[in-house]
Amino acid sequence: ETGVTQTPRHLVMGMTNKKSLKCEQHLGHNAMYWYKQSAKKPLELMFVYSLEERVENNSVPSRFSPECPNSSHLFLHLHTLQPEDSALYLCASSQDPGVDTGELFFGEGSRLTVL
Amino acid sequence: AQSVTQLDSHVSVSEGTPVLLRCNYSSSYSPSLFWYVQHPNKGLQLLLKYTSAATLVKGINGFEAEFKKSETSFHLTKPSAHMSDAAEYFCVVSDRGNDYKLSFGAGTTVTVRA
């Protein structure tokens, strides 16, 4: 496999459920990101990990909990979500964070619907 | 603070005609600017980037963009649209004032008519 892979592609959950989104990158990159994409709004950066350490947490509610066990894998654990959390969640990777290259490699996203 | 404004939320063109997507930016430093494309049900892909070299930047699939500092613009163009260009396009800015984190525009949806 190549690039950035996200699973599941689609997820429907109730407000009391607990689920996780998974991201895997096969590019040998050192940084991984979670973004939230809502309709007709700019992408919102949620979390940044560099070499498995969290370097950015953009005031994201605690019902979203990231985990980065190694430089190739990133999870987003979800619990007691709200309907307004329904969105496309995109994972991305880059060689390094905070470097003026701008090139992120994105996965295809996980479409989350909260009922 | 850095930001971008994409002036059109939706652009519709006929196949074979030129495409113009407009982007204005705001930055207190020398910015880097990018265009990303997102096809339906896909992730974002880098089209092209400007990082203080030549002001006219060529990207993939025949797209190009021109950095105009005096107008704080970075418009994306293509001479002849193809059906496969139907997608959403994002203008993005980064600068050292924000640790080179990317700031995305709200996106422009391009429709190509046969």
Image (cartoon, rainbow, N blue to C red):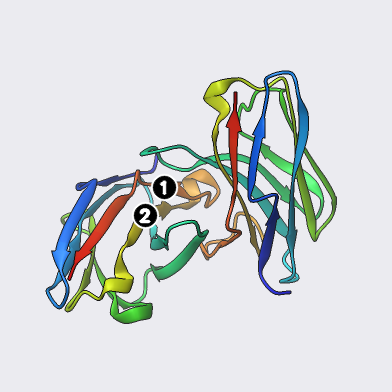
Residue in the foreground of this view, choosing between B66 and B70: B66
A92 shown above or below A17: below
Determine whether, in the image, residue B26 is placed left or right of residue B48: left
Pointer 1: what residue?
B104
- Looking at the rendered image, the quarter that the N terminus of chain A falls into is bottom right
Instruction: Report which residue position mark 2 lands on.
Output: B90
What residue is at 80 percent from the left and 55 percent from the top? Answer: A73
Q: Are marks 2 and 1 in contact (CB under 8 Å)?
A: yes
Viewer-closest of B14 and B3: B14
**Quadrant of residue B113 in the image?**
bottom left
How far across and how far down the image is residue A42, in percent? 41, 41
Please state, as top left, top right, bottom left or bottom right, where the C terminus of chain A lies in the image.
top right
Residue furthest to the right: A69
- Dot 2: element: strand
Tell me the residue at 25%/76% (across/down).
B82
Residue A24 in picture, x, y percent from top left = 75, 59
Q: Quadrant of residue A46?
A: top right
